[in-house]
Image (cartoon, grey):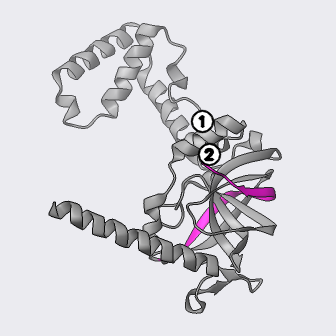
Amino acid sequence: MRSNLIALIITVFAFAHIQAAQAEVAQGPRDPAAQTSPSGAKRFDMSERILDLAIAASPTALDESIQEHGAVSWRDLKPTLKSLETPFETLPDPLLNAMRTQVRWRTSSTSERSDPDLIQEYKAANGVLAANDVDVEKLMLERRKIIAQNNSIGRGPNLEKLGTTIKLPGYIVPLTIGEGIVTEFLFVPVAGSCVHTPSPPPNQIIHVDYPKGVEFKSIFDAFWIEGELSDERIISDVTFYDGLANVESIYKLNANFVETLAF
């Protein structure tokens, strides 16, 4: 009973704090906390928005909206990576499975390698590969090259999407705001990204210019956005609850429209 009462008190306090924070957002940041962009417009300060995380909409809701409206998925903005099995995926199944065992052995921990079943499987795989003159080290070297290549392009843009008009659901991280109207912002797939959580990869952040402006109340309000996607590496100053940080984006979009997404 006591624990339930404490939980209720905490919930009421959090809700009141959230409402106060959101009201403050609608009115614009307080002068001491306000920053300015090079143009002189106020930049939004997120330092008081910690508890808003409690009401974040789930990524699943965005996925459902994407399917319903035939929009682009955030996953579509990631480049296509080469399969790590490419060097040996054309081998006959027995040899392919033996190479998979090789990979599992080499990527396993010391404790996992003490598993009798894995030891037996590894020895059997070695026997099969040796009997068929498979150059295991050469294939593993090719695999490491693919890993390095994937790592280098994995944070880059999907070239197939550049120059196309996309429609995408997501959340706003304001950069330039005046009287509750945002004209420059980062668009992200998860509410609170870049503010309360680690920043997404650069290819999951879109820098948006929208001179018309959109009314902004909370970083947990979802929006539809549409416009032509281009690649431009931009470093934006974002105020976290624990300080200022530089956030990298590699996509830029001049929005045709921005509108509220109702779940």
For the point 55% across and 29% down, the residue is 83
Q: Residues within 10 Å of mark 1 (few under 14, many from 20)?
A: few
Magenta residues, as a range? Answer: 243-263
Provide residue 228's location: percent of width, then percent of height.
82, 51
Q: Is residue 17 above or below residue 226?
A: below
Answer yes or no: is residue 79 visible: no
Q: Is residue 194 left or right of residue 97?
A: right
- Quote the CA–CA distance across marks 2 and 1: 8 Å
Question: Which residue has dot 2 on it?
Answer: 153
Q: Residues within 10 Å of mark 2 (few under 14, many from 20)?
A: some
Location of residue 10 (image quadrant): bottom left
Question: Which residue has dot 1 on it?
Answer: 81
Q: Is residue 9 above or below residue 261?
A: below
Which mark sits nearer the N-terminus, 2 or 1?
1
Answer yes or no: is residue 88 visible: yes
Q: Nearer the viewer, residue 138 or 19?
A: 19
For the point 48% across and 8% down, the residue is 92
Q: Is residue 91 above or below residue 87?
A: above
Q: Nearer the viewer, residue 228 or 88?
A: 228
For the point 54% across and 54% down, the residue is 190
Element type where label 1 sits in the image = loop
Provide residue 197's location: percent of width, then percent of height.
46, 62
| Residue 219 part of the magenta segment | no
The image's mark for residue 201 is none
Q: Specify the amino acid type for callout 1.
A: Leu
